[in-house]
Image: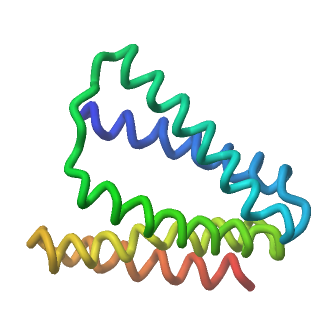
């Protein structure tokens, strides 16, 4: 198995567990933004510590890092608010459709191939979200 697939699978498990603990920690919409702030602070501190421990301290392109940070803040603030108001099984599933957005953008911006298999995967993902939401 390719190394990036192993990392992706393990990442998926951790992110799935984190979605549950996030829902357990946010009991109302007034806590959503502060939950995001605390979670981001912890990720930032631990991320910097990990970067220095692993000696991976090369600075990424600041323009794209800044744009990503702003987009993530807006997206996560909306997601945390949705999570505080609805069931995690539906909100997290809809949130995970960001993969569909990414695949489509990768095809148009990065010129990655949009194969029949990927189109089928996108279609099945959307059908899955619809079925989970019923």
Q: Residue at x 86, y 68 (%)?
A: 30
Q: Which colour scheme is used?
A: rainbow
Q: Taking 20 as reference, is 116 above or below it?
A: below
The percent coordinates of residue 20 (x first, y second) are: 75, 50
Q: Where is residue 55 in the image (x, y as percent from the top left)?
A: 29, 17
Residue plotted at (42% across, 59% down): 69
Q: Which residue occupies the foreground of this view, 46 or 23?
A: 46
Q: Could you tell whether 11 is left or right of 88 in the image?
A: left
> In the image, residue 77 lies at what x, y percent?
63, 68
> Looking at the image, which is closer to me, 3 or 110?
110
Picture quarter with the C terminus = bottom right
Tell me where residue 34 sits by quadrant: bottom right
Q: Quadrant of the N terminus?
A: top left
State left or right for residue 123 relative to residue 20: left
Q: Residue at x 47, y 22 (%)?
A: 49
Question: Compared with residue 40, is residue 47 higher up or lower down, i.e. above or below?
Answer: above
Where residue 104 sits, quadrant-wise, is bottom left
């Amino acid at each position: 198995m390719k190394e990036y697939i192993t990392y992706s699978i393990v990442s998926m498990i951790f992110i799935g567990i984190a979605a549950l603990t996030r829902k357990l920690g946010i009991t109302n919409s007034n806590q959503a933004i502060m939950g995001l702030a605390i979670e981001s602070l912890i990720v930032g501190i631990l991320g910097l510590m990990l970067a220095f421990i692993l000696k991976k301290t090369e600075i990424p392109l600041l323009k794209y890092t800044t744009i990503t940070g702003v987009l993530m803040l807006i997206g996560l603030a909306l997601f945390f608010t949705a999570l505080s108001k609805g069931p995690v099984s539906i909100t997290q599933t809809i949130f995970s459709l960001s993969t569909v957005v990414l695949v489509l953008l990768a095809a148009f911006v990065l010129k990655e191939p949009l194969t029949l298999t990927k189109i089928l995967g996108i279609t099945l993902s959307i059908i899955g979200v619809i079925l989970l939401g019923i």
